[in-house]
Image: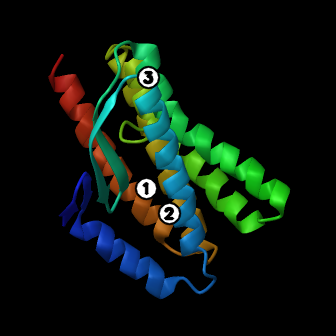
């Protein structure tokens, strides 16, 4: 489903419905607000740095900005870091206002996106700053992050915290492996 510059994939709707059905603590609206602020940070810096948004796609793995990035690797890295920065700014504001659940959702979203996995902001920052080089180092960092995410997901599942981190970790790990395989094959 596409409306203007926003495309919503079926996987996003299925995940949203599953989360809504299992959300006993009403945290989903807080996570969605934190995600909107996060993406707004990307969009603001993209606009300020001379980039241009083509389309925003909502998938089961999160939001994907299809855009013309600004020139220069530091400007591109700044666009990637703007999302986590907006998340941490929202965390500070929410904490100051006593909205601790919103602060928690926002800090988790910002920290998660800083993992050096290529589809996430941290992985994209490394890719831009390394100008596509250091593929072995980026692959090793991504592998360690994916294994860590998988182990945290298993621990959380075993502790009774649910399977969502494990599922998200597996989805992002597969996407990361595909991205890294493509980048290594291109060399």
Q: Secondary structure at mark 1?
A: helix
Whole-angstrom CA distance, mark 2 to mark 1, is: 6 Å
Q: Position of residue 55 (x, y in %)?
A: 25, 46
**Residue 132 numbered tag:** none
Left or right: 37 with respect to 143?
right
**Residue 49 numbered tag:** 3
Give the residue drawn at x 57%, y 41%: 84
Q: Position of residue 141 (x, y in %)?
A: 47, 31
Number of residue marks: 3
Q: Decide which of tag 1 and tag 3 comes sooner along the chain.
A: 3
Q: Secondary structure at mark 2?
A: helix
Whole-angstrom CA distance, mark 1 to mark 3, is: 31 Å
Please name which of the two marks, 1 or 3, marks the residue nearer to the observer.
3
**Callout 1: few (<14), some (14-19), or many (20+) C-alpha neighbours within 10 Å?**
many
Q: Quadrant of residue 99?
A: bottom right
Q: Is residue 186 visible?
A: yes
Quick one: quadrant of the N terminus?
A: bottom left
Give the residue drawn at x 46%, y 27%: 48
Left or right: 174 with respect to 163?
left
Instruction: Judge whether 42 appears above or below 48 on screen.
Output: below
Q: Are marks 2 and 1 in contact (CB under 8 Å)?
A: yes
Q: Decide which of tag 2 and tag 3 comes sooner along the chain.
A: 3
Q: Which residue is mark 2?
A: 165
Q: Which residue is mark 1?
A: 169
């Amino acid at each position: 489903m596409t409306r203007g510059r926003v495309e919503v994939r079926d996987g996003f709707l299925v995940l949203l419905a599953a989360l809504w059905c299992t959300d006993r603590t009403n945290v989903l609206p807080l996570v969605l607000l934190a995600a909107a602020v996060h993406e707004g940070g990307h969009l603001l810096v993209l606009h300020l740095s001379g980039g241009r948004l083509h389309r925003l796609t909502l998938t089961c793995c999160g939001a994907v900005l299809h855009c013309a990035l600004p020139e220069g690797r530091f400007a591109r890295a700044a666009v990637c870091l703007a999302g986590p920065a907006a998340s941490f700014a929202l965390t500070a504001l929410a904490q100051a206002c006593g909205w601790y659940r919103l602060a928690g959702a926002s800090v988790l979203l910002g920290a998660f996106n800083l993992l050096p996995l290529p589809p996430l902001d941290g992985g994209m920052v490394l890719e831009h700053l390394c100008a596509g080089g250091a593929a072995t180092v980026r692959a090793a960092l991504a592998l360690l992050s994916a294994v860590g995410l998988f182990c945290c997901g298993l621990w959380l599942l075993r502790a009774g915290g649910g399977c969502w981190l494990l599922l998200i970790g597996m989805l992002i790990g597969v996407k990361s492996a595909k991205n890294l395989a493509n980048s290594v094959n291109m060399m």
